[in-house]
Image (cartoon, grey):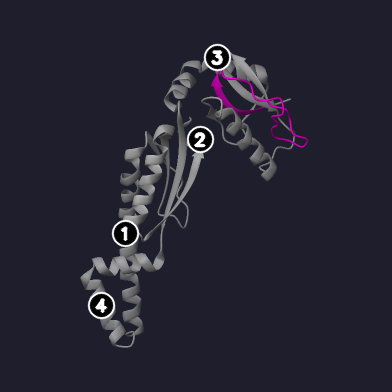
Amino acid sequence: MSTYVYGIARSSHPSLPDRASGVGDPPRPVRILRQGRLAAFVSDAPDDLKPKRRDLLAHQNVLREAGEEGTVLPLRFGGLSPDDQTLASVLEEREDHYLERLAVLDGKSEYNVKASHDEQSVLHRVLADNPALRATAEANRTAGGGSHQQKMQLGERIAKAVQLRETSDADVVRAALERAAEEVSAGPHSAGWLTNLSFLVARTRAAAFLNAVDELRTHQPHLVLTVTGPLPPYSFVE
């Protein structure tokens, strides 16, 4: 039977409570596999593993409980090993690397920040920062909206200005928040977000990081910031 892997910790890490349950239906009991100076939180893998809501939550809950007792290198959902012996061999082979990453992540959590524009606010900001564009928009409005061609040209100029603003605002978000973080990892681009960043933040600096987010909201009201965390540091584990 395959072994499902939730995360990797030092061998001195305490085991989870007996009630801890993992993925599968019925849930598989979670156990700890120790090899040298490392340990892995594992369970038997179900035959039909799929990213169902119950299993995704079970994976997160195991990492949350394990993380309360010490530093854990979290694996994303779906980490499988052919068996315990193969996993033990990997832990032995990459022991130094995993120990180095554990040392880097000690006392730290991940915060994910996604930023987008409030459409009306960014439009006002773009027009305020571009006198020529603002004058054209006002002239068209005075002329009853202008001709179809004039409307199209104005729309294209505004769209280009907003796109440039997205690029510059992505840099603003990163610069404002990375000072309170240890590391930054750029997430995949997705529609609707001008930037998607994960920050590795020391728990002792979590309040300072969240304060920096609040200050950014205050000084850049055209930005909509979505913050998720604290999270296991998924984005900082190779």
Please, what is the three-letter code of the amino acid marked with disc 1? Arg
Q: Which residue is mark 2?
A: 234
Please, what is the three-letter code of the amino acid marked with disc 3? Glu
Judging depth in this view, the residue of 129 and 51 nearest the camera is: 129
The residues tagged by marks 3 and 2 sit, at their Cα atoms, a distance apart of 22 Å
Chain-order first, disc 3 or disc 4: 3
Count neighbours of disc 2 (C-alpha within 10 A) and say few if under 14, some if 14 to 19, many if 20 or more. Answer: some
| CB under 8 Å between discs 3 and 4 | no
Judging depth in this view, the residue of 218 and 118 nearest the camera is: 218
- Indicate whether 158 appears above or below 53: below
Q: Dominant secondary structure of the magenta stretch?
A: loop
| CB under 8 Å between discs 2 and 1 | no
Q: Which residue is mark 4?
A: 136
Q: Which residue is mark 1?
A: 165
Which element is circle 2 on? helix
Q: Which residue is mark 3?
A: 92
Which element is circle 4 on? helix
The residues tagged by marks 2 and 1 sit, at their Cα atoms, a distance apart of 30 Å
The residues tagged by marks 4 and 2 sit, at their Cα atoms, a distance apart of 48 Å
Quadrant of the drawing holding the N terminus: top right
- Indicate whether 3 appears above or below 140: above
Q: Residue furthest bottom?
A: 144
